[in-house]
Image (tube, rainbow, N blue to C red):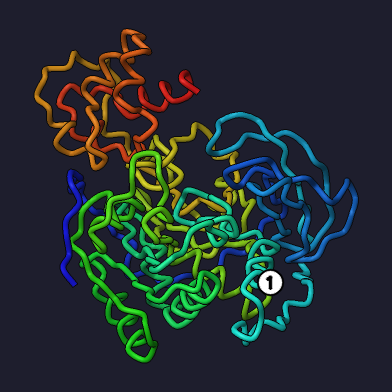
């Protein structure tokens, strides 16, 4: 296979300092704050009320329409209340279900009748995935059942194991410790889509995962492993398709337009758990890292407050002043530890803020941002026109095609907040 490099991109310092730490279970705290908005689309509708008793894995909210996702309880206990609470990504107060953990860990019956999934209609398997509340765990949180119901024929499934964000290593550890389950999840995806080919893509900075995945894939027909050069944002869908298949998704288009579906390895693992084991999505792998005394990769119940993680792991945060949920390039900085993890929380970083707070400078026309933009946009012009609120000209330079990877802001010598400006422009134009 001929590997083509995508245009643009940067090489930030990797800082994969937690890569050798095994996945550990974090004990569930006394209270969990499970947001009803943990996905792209409409907020889920609660199925429980105050003082109801719920079991671990029980459905507590159902999808509201097609672009929405079901939510399950991560513990057994009593519903304390349903109230508005700070959302870690949106930054506003949205409804949460507060669950008082009874510590008994009582669960629903997790047995599945779909272990031999190939004996069932693929639409039935999609419903199982939908009822398990699975969304894209790479960070996008797009409901997975929608991705698995394309209106076009799919030839290839790309399984994204690049994990190109600095610091994050939870996908790396999943591939090392659950390689067989991840590959079986890929086979389920291929079966559902009737796809002829599956390709697991890893960056070349993950030698242990490459070896583990190759050992498993060597016995699996129609599935290959491809290693690519480490480069950010290699894991973005359109860049991955260009690199591996040399196909370009049209502007405004979707991967299915070129016969491809891309899924994250963590999503594949969740699909395996749902279909083969009957376990819905109520916990996920999270990297805890940064300038702290305790780092690692942990299986964290969804709805766990960052403050509870700090207490449980006995983390000393006195030397840090910045908390980022996700990676440093595309993650969200939060101003408090009283925010819960959601399905898209892949990392919690505690950092010394190395960037001084000062006004950004004027554009010096160096065009570095143009050279690194993986979408081939003109971030320099976008930044200038957004700054001066020249919206007709902003629209001409297609801000909607920006994937918000942050390469432009990272490389800008004037420290202009280009990606934040483009996010703002998208909301204005919408």
Instruction: Please state if 252 lies on the left or on the right of 301 as rendered.
Output: left
* Residue furthest to the left: 366
Residue 212 position (above or below residue 330) = below
Residue drawn at 60 percent across, 37 percent down: 87
The percent coordinates of residue 168 (x first, y second) are 36, 56
The residue lying toward the viewer, choosing from 428 and 274, is: 428
Residue sitting at the far bottom: 219
Q: Quadrant of residue 73?
A: bottom right
Residue at coordinates 78% horizontally, 77% vertically from top-left? 109
User: Of helix, strand and loop, which one carries label 1?
Assistant: helix
How many numbered marks are there? Answer: 1
Q: Position of residue 365 (x, y in %)?
A: 11, 19
61 left or right of 297?
A: right
Q: Quadrant of residue 412?
A: top left
- The quadrant in which the N terminus is found is bottom left
- Figure quadrant of residue 196: bottom left
Query: Which residue has dot 1 on it?
Result: 124
Foreground of the two, 299 or 157: 157
Q: Residues within 10 Å of mark 1 (few under 14, many from 20)?
A: few
Measured from the top left, where is residue 287 in percent x and y?
43, 58
Residue 107 in percent (x, y) is at 77, 71
Q: State whether residue 384 is above or below residue 164.
A: above
Residue at image position (60%, 45%) is: 340
Q: Nearer the viewer, residue 46 or 257?
A: 257
The residue lying furthest to the front in this view is 152
Q: Is residue 366 above or below residue 262?
A: above
158 left or right of 145 in image: left
């Amino acid at each position: 296979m001929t590997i083509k490099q995508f245009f643009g991109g940067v090489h930030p310092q990797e800082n994969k300092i937690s890569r050798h730490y095994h996945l550990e279970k974090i004990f569930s705290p006394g209270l969990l704050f499970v947001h009803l908005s943990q996905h792209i689309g409409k907020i889920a509708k609660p199925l429980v009320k105050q003082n109801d008793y719920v079991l671990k894995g029980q459905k507590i909210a159902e999808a509201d329409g097609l672009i929405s996702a079901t939510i399950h309880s991560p513990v057994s206990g009593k519903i304390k209340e349903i109230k508005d609470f700070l959302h870690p990504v949106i930054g506003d107060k949205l409804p949460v279900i507060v669950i008082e953990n009874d510590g008994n860990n009582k669960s629903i019956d997790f047995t599945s009748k779909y272990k031999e999934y190939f004996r069932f209609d693929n639409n039935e398997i999609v419903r199982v995935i939908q009822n398990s509340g699975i969304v894209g765990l790479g960070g996008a949180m797009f409901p997975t059942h929608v991705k698995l119901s394309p209106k076009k024929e799919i030839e290839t499934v790309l399984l994204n194991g690049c994990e190109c964000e600095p610091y994050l290593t939870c996908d790396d550890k999943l591939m090392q410790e659950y390689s067989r389950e991840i590959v079986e999840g890929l086979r389920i995806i291929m079966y559902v889509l009737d796809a002829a080919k599956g390709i697991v893509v890893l960056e070349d900075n993950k030698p242990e995962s490459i070896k583990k995945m190759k050992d498993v894939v060597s016995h699996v027909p129609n599935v290959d492993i491809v290693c690519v050069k480490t480069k950010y944002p290699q894991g973005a869908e359109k860049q991955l398709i260009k690199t591996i298949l040399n196909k370009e998704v049209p502007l405004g288009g979707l991967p299915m337009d070129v016969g491809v579906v891309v899924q994250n390895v963590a999503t594949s693992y969740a699909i395996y758990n749902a279909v083969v084991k009957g376990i819905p999505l109520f916990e996920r792998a999270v990297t805890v890292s940064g300038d702290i005394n305790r780092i690692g990769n942990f299986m964290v119940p969804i709805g766990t407050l960052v403050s509870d993680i700090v207490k449980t792991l006995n983390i000393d945060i006195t030397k840090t002043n910045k908390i980022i949920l996700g990676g440093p390039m595309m993650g969200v900085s939060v101003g408090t530890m009283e925010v819960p993890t959601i399905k898209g929380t892949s990392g919690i970083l505690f950092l010394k803020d190395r960037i001084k707070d000062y006004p950004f400078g004027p554009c010096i026309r160096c065009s570095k941002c143009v050279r690194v933009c993986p979408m081939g946009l003109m971030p320099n012009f976008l930044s200038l026109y957004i700054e001066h609120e020249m919206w007709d000209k902003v629209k001409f330079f297609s801000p909607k095609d920006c994937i918000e990877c942050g390469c432009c802001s990272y490389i800008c010598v004037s420290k202009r907040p280009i990606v934040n400006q483009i996010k703002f422009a998208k909301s204005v134009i919408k």
